[in-house]
Amino acid sequence: MPLCSSVRTPNRACKMTEEELEYLLSPIGQEALSFAATLPEDSLSAVEALRKRFGPKHAAVVAEQVCLRRKAKAKFSRADAMFFTREGLEQSSAEVVSKHRAKRFSGMETVADLCCGIGGDSIALAEQTGLLVGVDIDTLKVRLTKLNLEAYDLGAKALLFAGRAEEFDCDADAVFIDPSRRVGNRRIRRLEDTEPPMDAVYALCERFGSVCLKASPMLDDSRVPIPHELEIVSVAGEVREAVLWFGGFRTCRRRATLLPEGITITENPNATAEVRPPGEYLLDPDGAVVRAHLIDEAAVQLNAWKLDENIAYLSCSSPVFSPLARCYRVLDLFPFGLKRLNRRLNELGAGRVEVKKRGFPMPAEDVVRMLKVNGDRAITVVIARIGGGHTVFLCEPCGPTEGSFPCAQC
């Protein structure tokens, strides 16, 4: 049983209070945090020791913070010295993403971080700029931003205020804004439902010119009424967020950025990939490339072609090793049919099967449940709508030992 779950009292709300933060900052609170950090994550005896030494009420506060710090290590290099709320941590970008974004602010004298939250982006911005001005409507979050900047020795480079983002009227060379996309525990995906509302954000764009807006990766940017650059960012193959760049920040119309490699690909109206029958290898483009609608650009760079005008899988005649796409050797392909699929998998000795699909209505996990294999070979099943029907590709991932086909961006 996780430490934080074990000590959380039933009536305690998940949101941190000012009183709880004061306790954590007090000498006894610091002692409790240090003690809790040494306890095993799953230990009832450890939970009892924390309660006995600091009391049930304070044990719950301390355990919650220690658990959040442990989770935050996946995002922040100095998580052990930072302070978090559950909501604030969930909404924070990973450090590698914040640092990437902040590079466009490099050398600016004054930058405003509106809706600064717990300060995750403030840290990266303060490292790149002369002065960071942080604003949030929540006074507790403003305090957390201050503490977290100090954890990175950046407290002296920031001025922090409690207030509404749309009422910010100080001078700034550029603005970063991360509107709240949650109502209670529900995540908001529509731009129209953010806080502050998007009309206020667009007004900030007109006032300051150079504005960066963090958004959901599910964003439909065709509904954004003013000129912008859309950047889709992935980390280790997982799409993390969309970024809208306005005014002086715009460098193109669409961009996909793959971290931690730092590979980027931008829209090229002259890039047009052929549509041809499958070759010996199948390429599964990174999610950022797909979401940014840069399939043709990736195909041209990878010397590949499309299998269908509306499907994101690519094909090529030689193995390609690039962060832009995962490469698979095609062992067999045929029209989708469950009996034939099971038969061929067993003929190939499949035992561990991964299913990937595009343009196929059945969830991948449902397909996996219908497969009956008993071998020991790892096979990737790719199902794609090509032309008027669904084609099955039986594949194996390619490793870098097979040689590589270099591309311009890699």
Image: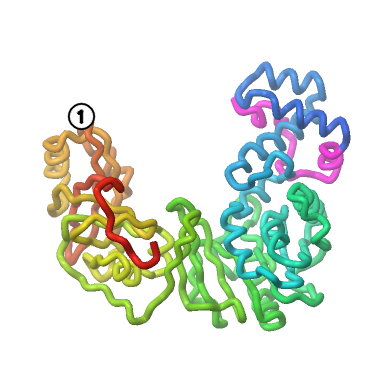
Q: Nearer the viewer, residue 347 or 38?
A: 38
Residue placed under numbered mark 1 in the picture = 374
* Residue 329 in sight from this viewpoint: yes
Which element type, helix, strand or loop, lies under badge 1?
A: loop
Where the N terminus falls, by quadrant? top right
Quick check: is 16 in the magenta stretch?
Answer: yes
Identify whether 401 is placed above or below 360: above
Identify whether 303 is placed above or below 99: below
> Magenta part of the protein: which range?
1-25
Where the C terminus falls, by quadrant? bottom left
Q: Residue at x 74, y 36 (%)?
A: 12
Q: Residue at x 27, y 48 (%)?
A: 398
Identify whether 155 is placed above or below 177: above
Q: Viewed as shown, does residue 320 lie left or right of 4?
A: left
Q: Nearer the viewer, residue 321 or 281?
A: 321
Quick check: is 285 in the magenta stretch?
Answer: no
* Amino acid type indicated by mark 1: Asn
Q: Within 10 Å of the Cα at label 1, are there few (<14), some (14-19), or many (20+) other Cα atoms? A: few
Identify whether 134 is placed above or below 202: above
Q: Viewed as shown, does residue 21 lie left or right of 10?
A: right
Q: Nearer the viewer, residue 59 or 289?
A: 289
Q: Residue at x 65, y 63 (%)?
A: 178
- Residue 325's spot in the image, x, y percent? 34, 57
Q: Residue at x 67, y 67 (%)?
A: 177
- Residue 289's spot in the image, x, y percent? 40, 64
- Residue 216's spot in the image, x, y percent? 54, 62
* Residue 361 in sight from this viewpoint: no
Q: Viewed as shown, does residue 344 lie left or right of 111?
A: left
The image shows a total of numbered marks equal to: 1
Q: Viewed as shown, does residue 183 lie left or right of 311?
A: right
- Residue 86's spot in the image, x, y percent? 67, 45
Residue lying at the far top in this picture: please name it: 45
